[in-house]
Amino acid sequence: MRLLVVEDDRDLNRQVSAALEAAGYAVDRSFDGEDGWFRGDTEPYDAIVLDLGLPKRDGISILEAWRKAGRTTPVLILTARDRWSEKVQGIDAGADDYVAKPFHMEEVLARLRALLRRAAGHATSDLAVGPVRLDARAGRVTVDGAAVKLTSHEYRLLSYLMHHAGRIISRSEIVEHLYEQDFDRDSNTIEVFIGRLRKKLGVDIIKTARGLGYVVGIEDEGGATAR
Ligand code: CA
């Protein structure tokens, strides 16, 4: 899962981004409204954290522009405390949720988890495909109840595939949702990641759709339906 944080307060941006990275997300940072709008308009983020008071272009106008252009990316806005009118304006402009400043990082994380799972059509943050469970809240993966230790990239990859179980995900889509913008991206490494992930999980829930990509949670050869 790849997120964008648009916040001009550098300290706050750094705090939020660091917390999101620690929670296993790839994070791009933006510090003004013009740059934030452009990134959100051109990159396929899984969710965006958007401050409303920004230099160059305010958050509400950015959000309206994204929605007008048909961008459905979930957006969590950061509003000033006690400014109920700002919250109403933000939600009317197309925000999916808000957090009032000052906030606890845990609340931002929980609200983002909820937006991400809802966008993918899941009712909880605890995803299961066959014997594999991914608890997005704890950032934990288990197979038949036994914990599996994954690197942050492996976790991101599995989380993305499991959030979109049943859908074929191309390698280029994986690359776009796995890495920060400045990362040296190479879609060939995805195959290596998938190989390692399969090995660590020890169960065959990631299928290769030849020439198309990968899919998790389809019927396996034994006829048992995963998920
Ligand atoms: Ca601000």
Image (tube, rainbow, N blue to C red):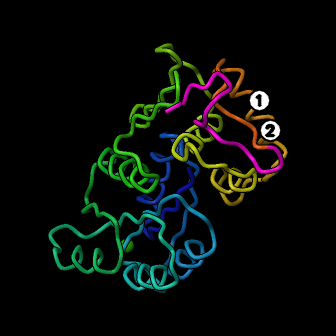
User: Which residue lies under the disc numbered 2?
Assistant: 191
Q: Is residue 153 above or below residue 66?
A: above
The kind of secondary structure the magenta stretch mainly shows is loop
For image coordinates 62% across by 68% down, the residue present is 43
Three-letter amino acid code at the position of disc 2:
Glu
Residue 212's spot in the image, x, y percent? 77, 51
Across and down, in percent, residue 179 comes to 67, 51
- Foreground residue among 145 and 32: 145
Instruction: Determine the residue positioned at 85% across, 45% down.
Output: 188
In the displayed structure, 76 sits above or below 16; it is: below
Front-lying residue, 128 or 185: 128
Q: Secondary structure at mark 2?
A: helix
Crowding at label 1, few (<14), some or many (≥20) Cα neighbours within 10 Å? few
- The magenta stretch is 210-227
Quick check: which quadrant has ligand 1? bottom left
Instruction: State left or right for residue 69 relative to residue 79.
Output: right
Q: Does the stretch in magenta take in 218?
A: yes
Query: Of residues 8 and 57, which is closer to you in this image?
Result: 57
| Residue 127 percent coordinates (x, y) | 44, 35
Compared to residue 222, the image places residue 217 above or below, namely: below
- Judging by the rendered image, the residue that carries numbered circle 1 is 195
Q: Which mark is residue 131?
A: none
For the residues labelled 2 and 1, say whether their Cβ atoms are less than 8 Å apart. yes
- Relative side of 195 to 165, left or right: right
Q: Amino acid at mark 1?
A: Gly
Q: CA distance from mark 2 to mark 1?
A: 6 Å
Q: Quadrant of residue 103?
A: bottom left
For label 1, the SS is helix
Task: Classify mark 2 as within 8 Å of ligand 1 or not, answering yes or no.
Answer: no
Q: Percent position (x, y) of residue 192?
A: 80, 34
